[in-house]
Image (cartoon, grey):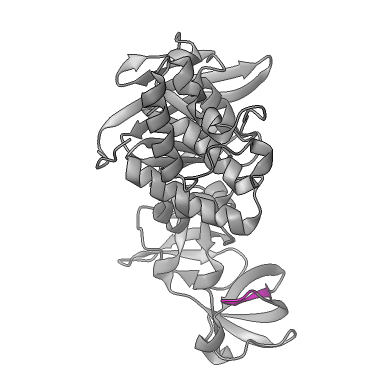
Amino acid sequence: MEGHSPQRDSRILEISGVTKTFGPTTALAGIDLDVREGEFLTLLGPSGCGKTTLIRIIAGFETPTAGDVRIDGRSIVAAPPYRRPLGMVFQSLALFPHLNVAENIGYGLKIRRVPPARRQAKVAQALEMVGLAGYGERYIGQISGGQKQRVALARAIVTEPRVLLLDEPLGALDMKIRRQMQTELKQIQESLGTTFIFVTHDQEEALTMSDRIAVFRNGAIEQVDTPAAVYERPATRFVAEFVGDTNFLEGTVDRQAGGAPRVRLADWDCSLQPPAAQWAEGARVGVSLRPQHLRIAALEQGRLRATVLRRVYAGQNTRLWLAVGQRKLLADWHGAEDGAPPEPGATVGLTWDDRRVCVVSL
């Protein structure tokens, strides 16, 4: 289980036109996705969007209605799960309570008839990698939830799969252990150099762990990109609103004579100049502006006037709920950097840097 440098441009898994229907319901609608050698790819989306269905098709637990799945250029659609060079960590973990930790981890090796001495050595190596050295003789009922998660991970990696599938494996853990496991999981993935495909509905989890994120909605992929691109440059309104908090406004493109295009916001006498200029005159567009990019200013310096409705202390910042006319906006007040936050009922100015705005089609 020696690590290697990821080959970021080498495709290990190719998903082509994969569709899955259950009676009249379309769970996946023509999915195309290439997964790179050694990357941590996250499938992100709300419940029922198709991400787990896709994982089950890759694993061989479901058969696609149409389309193909290839590993290293070879179709695996007709191959049973045990013939696929994959490992999987289930949400339920699926550990055997009558076996001890070492026996659970070595179960896949035993099925593959790996000789006992080599099996024992590989199990010991896996235990060391997940931080459970010395726990091999304990039974599943004698270890914590976080330790059970490590056992499930060790069992999956000990067989050295080409691709490891993880279906919301951290969902049952409390927040502190969950964040610790996120860090450890990413470190293990980088150490092994194995391709991980991780399923979650947790946006923070996806942003902090992934090399790339595929955002799912209603059986289709809305965007595939790096965490920074998905967050800062969402391709659609859904991505902007699903991945983190945002203020989503609507406007119309106004190309002034000889000048750069501007977006005139629909609800207010205010316009902005987007960083991209590909929009046609009169096009209706959406504007995504993250709360941390919306700044409180003196009334005379603001582009808009707002009334503070509510404020909530959140540690590193204070979240403000604001009203601009009939619209509600969110802004983050950044503690000592900005001084004391305004009181509810105060009237303030709002401003922002147009370079922080993302404009999408409606």
Q: Residue at x 56, y 35 (%)?
A: 101
Foreground: 319 or 169? Answer: 169
- The quadrant holding residue 344 is bottom right
Foreground: 104 or 194? Answer: 104
Q: Is residue 110 above or below residue 139?
A: above
Residue 126 visible in rendering: yes
Q: Is residue 236 above or below residue 92?
A: below
Quadrant of the drawing holding the N terminus: top left
Residue 158 visible in rendering: no
Which residues are the magenta region?
Answer: 314-323
Q: Residue at x 35, y 21 (%)?
A: 71
* Left or right side of 163 for 351: right
Q: Is residue 278 magenta?
A: no
- The quadrant holding residue 79 is top left
Residue 237 image offset from top left, x and y in percent: 55, 50
Q: Is residue 69 above or below residue 209?
A: above
Q: Residue at x 62, y 66 (%)?
A: 267
Residue 41 image offset from top left, x and y in percent: 42, 40
* Outermost top residue: 78
Most common SS among magenta residues:
strand
Foreground: 285 or 47? Answer: 47
* Left or right side of 322 for 125: left
* Marker count (numbered): 0
Q: Is residue 315 magenta?
A: yes
Q: Residue at x 49, y 39 (%)?
A: 198
Residue 233 image offset from top left, x and y in percent: 43, 55
